[in-house]
Image: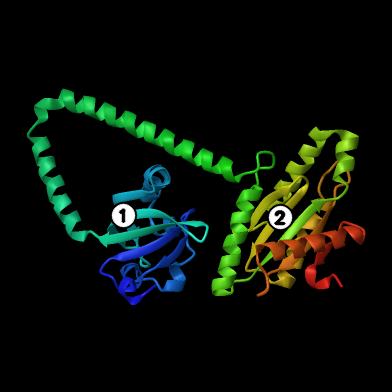
Amino acid sequence: MDDQLNYAPCGFITLSNTGMITDANQTLLNLLKYERGELLNRHIETVMNVANKIFFHTYFYPFIQLNGYVNEIYLTLKNKNDMEVPVLLNGVRKERDGDTYIDCVLIEMRKRIEYERDILSSKRKLEELNQAKDEAHETLKALNEELEKKQEELIKLNRSLEAQASTDGLTGVKNRRSFQESLEGSMSLFNRLQIPFSLLLIDIDYFKRINDTYGHPVGDEVLIKVAKIMQSQSRDIDIVARYGGEEFAIILPDANRDNAVLVAERYRMEIQQGDWGEYNITVSVGVATVSDADDEETIVSRADQSLYTSKSRGRNRVTHSDDRS
């Protein structure tokens, strides 16, 4: 970003198509009292209050996806000290290098708020002088309640659609599309800030035999229970996803080689010791920890090769890519 834009008399911010902050000028950083490294790669909604998050979901995202731009959106952001910062936002969606970005200009609006407060104060006094219009007021109140109800229904619908788009319908964990987005985000954080992570690929041993012997409904129950066990053993920041068929993928943020192997062994043991009745359920695990030479494809490939090694060495075991030789 050149100095002219970096120190422009208004804030400038670039968002990914999913709302992640990819760039911001110094004017906005000063306004929000953040250092560049503290704000980049965070979701824009982390600097909003609850009301503005709802507004962003119900208006900003749908409108900019449909029209490619938004004009004069009034928002209240939160700075690093949790103080409110009112801004007016204009945004435009752009394609760069095959990716979609949203460029936004933000102008601080404190003076306008003072004027709006004066207007609201005058409006309240006027309403006090028009008590005779109670019937019209009650009608307006009823219409407003109906509008709020419709807005709540729309918000719930949007949340439901968002969850469906990122969740595996059978197991309830993240789906492969959501996993891929999370992997790209983890790789971006590593490339920018050297924040490590590890990847686990977990495959249910002899799963085809379970389907062939007991039928697919039983196989589905096994998949659901394995997913629940992994979720119960995961941190809030871990990403648990169904990678395909009987295979799961887990991203462990800020986990080095040793930590990743310990976590993988815990998953393996919890599944082996689970209450499976007449079935004998175990998993094989392949682990890879990110390195400077990796991209999204290579780290998945290394974890997959490690998974293959675990299976070839007898299954029900964990293999890190560093230990394959």
The total of numbered circles placed on residues is 2
Q: Would you place residue 137 above or below residue 125 in this image?
A: above
152 or 186, which lies in front? 186
> Mark 2 falls on what kind of element?
strand
Q: CA distance from mark 1 to mark 2?
A: 39 Å
Nearer-N-terminus badge (1/2): 1
Q: Is residue 101 visible?
A: yes
Quarter of the rendering occupied by the C terminus: bottom right
- Give the residue type that dot 1 points to: Asn
Indicate the position of residue 55 as horizontal and vertical percent values: 37, 46
Residue 237 in the figure: left or right of residue 305 = left
Hey, which quadrant is residue 129 in on the image? Answer: top left
What x and y, as percent, mark residue 165? 57, 43
Q: Is residue 41 left or right of residue 167?
A: left
Q: Circle 2 is placed at which residue position? A: 249
Q: Residue at x 90, y 41 (%)?
A: 209
Position of residue 184 measured from the top left corner of the image (x, y, whole percent):
60, 61
**Residue shown at 91% from the left, 36% from the top:** 213
Outermost residue to the left: 129
Give the label, 1 or 2, closer to the camera.
1
Q: Nearer the viewer, residue 9 or 260?
A: 9
Tell me where residue 236 appears, x and y as whole percent.
Answer: 60, 57
Residue marked by disc 1: 90
Note whether 159 is above or below 111 in the view shown. Answer: above
* 159 lies left or right of 258: left
- Three-letter code for the amino acid on which mark 2 is drawn: Ala
Above or below: residue 224 compared with residue 313: above
